[in-house]
Amino acid sequence: MSPRTAPDPARRNERSRRAILTAAVDLVGEVGYRNLTIEAIAARAGVGKQTIYRWWRSKGAVVFDGFLHLQQDGGDLTLPDSGDLGADLTALLRATVADLVDPGQDATYRALNAEIQHDPELASELVDHLLAPLLEATRQRLHSAQRAGQIAADVDLDLAVELLYGPVYHRWLLRTAPLTGEYAAALVTLVLRALRSHPDA
């Protein structure tokens, strides 16, 4: 008879963690953030609520980690660099728009944006782990274009990144108009026109 192997606590904990994160994201989409409870997450994940409180300080923290887990499962962040800055930025913003209007991600991301208004620690985590990597990768792509002479040498790259993403998030957050791939393409055209301008032009 083969000896019995004791359960691996690390593997069990990782399985529970994944179940909790999946349950949190799924439930936000089903019932909305306001109606979401730790008890409901625990029941869906098949764990005790004490397990959740041991690993996360709040409902918002669980939802954020769930959303981050979802993003990481989609693959590493890589930006296109084909040499055609307009095409690359258009592909990037179209993908950003597609994520924002996806029903599952939309509900979770709106919940997080509401939660960070009164949770500075969660806001800092969202910026550090979710937003900052995208902004820095975009900045590096613009820097590459600047070195290649595709945009003006005196362009403030941090401001240029804001010009790209700011209107997208404004339209998404306030629902002022439909957020579409066509809008993303038009925005890139307008921003690049400004970035390629010279003071004496």
Image: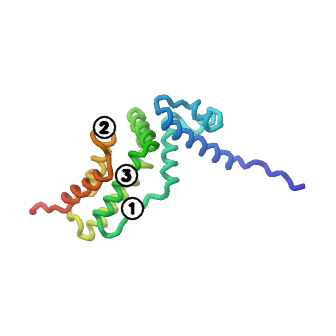
Q: Nearer the viewer, residue 184 or 124?
A: 184
Q: Which mark is drawn over residue 96?
A: 3
Q: Is residue 168 left or right of residue 102?
A: left
Residue indicated by mark 1 = 79
Q: Residue at x 49, y 28 (%)?
A: 35
Q: Position of residue 169 (x, y in %)?
A: 32, 45
Q: Is residue 135 left or right of residue 197?
A: right
Residue indicated by mark 2 = 174
Mark 1 or 2, closer to the camera: 2
**Amino acid type indicated by mark 1:** Leu
Quarter of the rendering occupied by the N terminus:
bottom right
Q: Position of residue 163 (x, y in %)?
A: 26, 51
Q: What element does badge 1 sit on?
A: loop
Which of marks 2 and 1 precedes in the sequence?
1
Q: Is residue 179 left or right of residue 9?
A: left
The CA span between labels 2 and 3 is: 16 Å
**Amino acid type indicated by mark 3:** Thr
Q: Is residue 183 above or below residue 43?
A: below
Which of marks 1 and 3 precedes in the sequence?
1
